[in-house]
Every structure is written in structure tokens, then in C-alpha cells.
Image: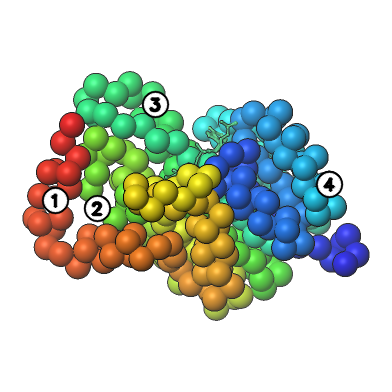
Amino acid sequence: MRQEDRPTALVTGASTGIGEAFARELARRGHDLVVVARGADRLDALAADLKDAFSTVTEVLPGDLTDRTQAAAVEERLADATRPVDILVNNAGALTSGLFAKLPIAGEVAQVELNAVVPVRLTHSVLPVMLDRGKGAIVNVSSIAGEAPTPFGATYGAAYSFLTAFSQAVHMEVRRYGVTVTALLPGFTAAAADPARRVQDAGRVVRDGLAAVSAGRPVCIPGRRNKTSAAFARLAPRSLVRAVMEASRNP
Ligand SMILES: NC(=O)c1ccc[n+]([C@@H]2O[C@H](COP(=O)([O-])OP(=O)(O)OC[C@H]3O[C@@H](n4cnc5c(N)ncnc54)[C@H](OP(=O)(O)O)[C@@H]3O)[C@@H](O)[C@H]2O)c1
């Protein structure tokens, strides 16, 4: 493939975990990459690895996405119609947990910014170029935690409820123009699967997510157990869902 024909993917939080698995899988499938995270060293090492393995051209864009000035560089890159991004993966995220009243408010606000507001800003930056081109895909890595109110992870669950709903709404707006938005809702995920602890491996989560993108699906919940939990959270009476969440998450 000539270099200019290769599609480009921008992945946030690409230095570890699910984001790194997205970067590796998209590179393996012939994408060039733009990778974002705070730590430049890991991104540089990833870029070198991907160049060796797949001849991938990787732009490294280090920055803290909770800092509006640093996030603006990523927004500008996404809005650049001369170097269009074919797939945006909003994956960078943070987890805070504990009694909400005792958690530092700065961390809670930063978490909502990173898990919910940043994907809104980056989606808004990239969509005009995608709509003009009549193609493009956005993956918003959300969480199954967003399917029910989450005591001791109150802002985490709520931010992902927002992100999952937002993603579906925008998908309905743009799919007629050839652009899709997919909310990916993993459960517990790590580098290696551990079925006894209900942990899925990141590679599996990413492959399921990309299959949903290819199929133009707005929501992807990887794994049968996670699908069952989500179905319970969506279909059961709210009072029962709250009772189960309160009982299972009390410290
Ligand atoms: N793992 C799970 O069980 C699970 C389950 C459901 C949903 N999720 C969601 O899936 C996503 C990935 O999870 P993960 O477990 O793979 O995460 P992870 O291993 O903690 O990686 C997070 C990535 O985001 C980057 N990042 C963190 N804060 C950032 C910031 N302020 N600005 C820019 N980049 C930042 C990190 O790099 P730097 O530290 O260098 O910035 C890293 O590359 C997250 O959104 C998470 O909430 C995870």
C-alpha cells in the first residue's frame, strides 16, 4: 500500500492497557497512528516497536488531556483536513473510587473531564472532517460500570453513563453521512484473561470493538457475562438494580 493510502487512527491513552492493544491491532491492520498520553517515553517506545513490526508511521502527541491547552493540540490535529483521521479511539480514562464525600474534589472533576468531557471535545473536533469525507469511525471506550449507578465509584459510573448515551445519540445523527460512533463497554480487563476473576484480555476487547465498528454498531459489550450484567441493569426495576449495587459494593 502506498503511504498516502494508509488509513490513520488516533488513539488516546495508547501507552498501556486497552489503548495500547488498540494501537497494536490497528497497526497490524495497516493503519498509521497518532498516539496520545501524558508519558512520552512509553509512546516513543511503542512507535519504535510498531515501526519494526508493521512499518507503521506513528506521530507521538504527548499531553495531559485534562489540561485544556494541551488537549487543544489534539483537537487541532483531529480538525486538520489535510491529514484526515479515519478512526478516533477515545480511550484515555481514569478510575477513582471510594466514598465520594471523602475523595478530593479536584480528582473527581478531572475524572469527569477525562472520561466524559474530553471525548465530547475530540468527537466534536474530528466530526466535521469525517462528515465532509463521508466516512470515518469513532470508538468511545466507556464501561459496563455506566449501566448502573455505582456507589464508591459514583463519578466513574456516571461519567460512563453519559458517554454511552452521548455516543449513541451522535451515532444516530451521523450514520446517514457514512460516519459511525461506537461505545465500547468493557468489564474488568487486563493484559491477560482470568476467567475465574471475570477478567477479559485487552486484545479480545479490542477485536470485539473493531468488529462492532465494521458492522456499524453503536454499542459493543464484549463477553457473555458482561452482556448478561448489562441486560439485567437495563431491564430490571431501578429499585432492584440499586439494591443489588448497594449490596455488592458496600465496603
Ligand atoms: N481495565 C478495565 O478493567 C476497564 C474496564 C472498563 C472500562 N475501562 C476504560 O478503558 C479505558 C482504558 O483502560 P485501561 O485499564 O487500559 O487504562 P490504563 O491501563 O490505566 O491506561 C490509561 C491510558 O490513558 C492514559 N492517560 C491517563 N490519564 C491521562 C490524561 N490525563 N491525559 C492523557 N492520557 C492519559 C495513560 O497514559 P499516561 O499515564 O502516560 O497518561 C494510559 O495510556 C479507560 O477509559 C478505562 O476507564 C477499563
The 10 Å Cα crowd at callout 3, few under 14, some 14 to 19, many 20 or more, is few
* Residue 90 in picture, x, y percent from top left: 55, 50
First along the sequence among labels 2 and 3 = 3
Q: Quadrant of the N terminus?
A: bottom right
Q: Residues within 10 Å of mark 2 (few under 14, many from 20)?
A: many
Residue bearing mark 1: 244
| Labels 3 and 4 touching (C-beta < 8 A) | no
Residue in the image at 42% along x and 49% along y: 194
Q: Gap between marks 4 and 2, in whole Å? A: 43 Å
Residue at point 44% right, 42% down?
Answer: 115
Is the residue 231 above or below the residue 123 in the image?
A: below
Q: Which mark is residue 107?
A: 3
Q: Nearer the viewer, residue 126 or 55?
A: 55
Residue shown at the point (77%, 54%) measured from the top left:
32
- The answer to whether the residue labelled 4 contacts the one labelled 1, judged by CB atoms less than 8 Å apart, is no
Q: Is residue 237 left or right of residue 96?
A: left
Query: Viewer-proximal residue, 167 or 80?
Result: 167
Which residue carries the number 4 mark?
52
* Labels 3 and 4: the sequence-earlier one: 4
Give the answer, above or below, for where 208 lies relative to 245.
below
Residue type pointed to by label 3: Gly
